[in-house]
Amino acid sequence: MNIKTSMVDFPSNGRTTPGYLARPDDKGGHPAVVVIQEWWGLVPHIEEVADRFAAEGYVALAPDLYHGQAASEPDEARKLAMALDRDKAVAEIGAAARYLKGLPTVNSQKVGVVGWCMGGGLSLSAAAEDGHIGAAVCFYGRPLSEADTARLEVPVLGLYAGEDHGIAVSDVRAFERELERQGVPHEIHLYEEAHHAFFNNTRPVYDPEAAADAWKRVLAWFGTYL
């Protein structure tokens, strides 16, 4: 499928937020997803993932939560992530969902949200906060607290790594049990041999097999719930 891409500015928090928009090159109605960056920022890898969604028939918007800043080294990325106003970022993700719903090429009432690492945790927080989001996918993001999990009303797909040294498997399993207890539709999949950031094909820990399987699960999840 041919796609179109562009940088856009969408209204948020009384101002505007930049973002990368990728969509099928046609006039038909499509479902939509918000694509949330890792701690590196809105880098080419995230734009490429948005392109992949567009090629699958989605209108995808990756908001630039760092507003023009990006990192290539972990120390720099850590500083940017620590400086991020999380509440503002969650509000910007909700604003991105509302912007997508207003586009003439989008035909769904609910918008999906998917994120990786820092963005994975933000995808869960946004899903708990914003009623415009209809399904969430979290790649190796920090699980929600018990209180925030109780606020979730949308299906959650969690994709985690067994060799993740930042997020313990025990925490993932505890989150899974809490989702079950709260009656939230969910699927938590653990790639036992994979490492954190296994989906990012620009990083040394990239795991092609796990990434390919995870991509199929994401498309199936959004295909079911959007």
Image: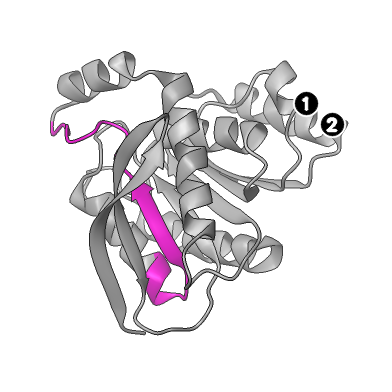
Residue 65 appears in the figure: yes
Please tell me the numbered disc located at residue 32: none
SS assignment for the magenta stretch, majority: loop
> Which image quarter holds the N terminus?
bottom left
Q: Is residue 129 left or right of residue 92?
A: right
Q: Residue under circle 1? A: 150
Rendering quarter of residue 164: top left
Do the residues under discs 1 and 2 have CB atoms within 8 angstroms?
Answer: yes
Q: Residue at x 47, y 76 (%)?
A: 57
Query: What segment is highlighted magenta in the picture?
Result: 53-72
Q: Position of residue 212 (x, y in %)?
A: 44, 63
Q: Position of residue 46 (x, y in %)?
A: 29, 51
Q: Position of residue 14 (x, y in %)?
A: 40, 30
Q: Is residue 171 left or right of residue 211?
A: right
Q: Is residue 86 left or right of residue 158?
A: left
Quick check: 62 above or below 41?
Answer: below
Quick check: 170 above or below 154?
Answer: above
Q: Position of residue 157 (x, y in %)?
A: 63, 48
User: Closer to the N terminus: mark 1 or mark 2?
Assistant: 1
Q: How far is mark 1 from mark 2, CA to CA? A: 6 Å
In the image as oriented, which residue stretches furthest toward the left? 72
On whether residue 58 falls in the magenta region, the answer is yes
In terms of secondary structure, where does tag 1 sit?
A: loop
Q: How many marks?
A: 2
Render colour scheme? one colour
Please tell me the numbered disc located at residue 182: 2
Tell me the crowding category of disc 1: few under 14, some 14 to 19, or many 20 or more residues within 10 angstroms, Cα based: some
At label 2, the amino acid type is Gln
At label 1, the amino acid type is Ala
Q: Residue at x 32, y 59 (%)?
A: 21
